[in-house]
Amino acid sequence: MSLARILTILSATVMAIAATATSASATTAPDTWETGEGLTTMQTLAYFVGGPILLVAVIWVLAAAVVAKSRNFVPTPPSTEIETVSDQH
């Protein structure tokens, strides 16, 4: 695994944790906020299980596309003709 992949996975993980932890950092809600209904069990599972699985799947597909593209690259062969250089500069 290359360094770029490791850094991509680490940075995506840190950003995902930072994005999901912001709402948990508030200890109490202001009095002007309505409390509303809580999440159902299926919604909670979708967010905390399905979300990370989806994130990993998207990163995996992007990495696989990059690897597949780099494996199919065939450089043009060098020319077999010898070029002559004149003595005049």
Image (tube, rainbow, N blue to C red):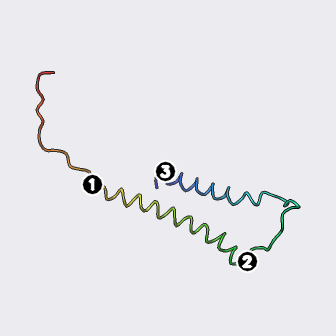
Type of residue at label 3? Ala
Judged by depth in the image, the label closer to the viewer, 2 or 1, is: 2
Instruction: Report how far apart the C-alphas of labels 1 and 3 lie in the structure.
Output: 23 Å
- Seen in the image, is 20 located left or right of residue 1? right
Which residue bears the numbered disc 1? 74
Q: Dot 3: what SS?
A: helix
Q: Is residue 53 left or right of residue 25?
A: left
39 sits left or right of 66 in the view? right
Q: Quadrant of residue 82?
A: top left
Residue 35, quarter of the rendered image: bottom right
Q: How many marks?
A: 3
Q: Is residue 74 above or below residue 81?
A: below
Residue 1 vs residue 84: left or right? right
Q: Which of the two marks, 2 or 3, is nearer to us in this view?
A: 2
Mark 2 Cα shell of 10 Å, populated few (<14), some (14-19), many (≥20): few
Give the labeled residue for mark 2: 40
Query: Do tag 2 and tag 3 residues touch (Cβ < 8 Å)?
Result: no
Residue at disc 1, secondary structure: loop
Kind of residue indicated by mark 1: Val
Instruction: Please give the residue where the numbered disc 3 appears in the rendered image.
Output: 4
Q: Amino acid at mark 2?
A: Thr
Q: Do tag 2 and tag 1 residues touch (Cβ < 8 Å)?
A: no
Q: Earlier in the sequence, mark 1 or mark 3?
A: 3
> Label 2 vs label 3: CA separation?
38 Å
Q: Dot 3: few (<14), some (14–19), or many (≥20) neighbours within 10 Å? A: few
- Relative image position of residue 59 (x, y in whole percent): 51, 61
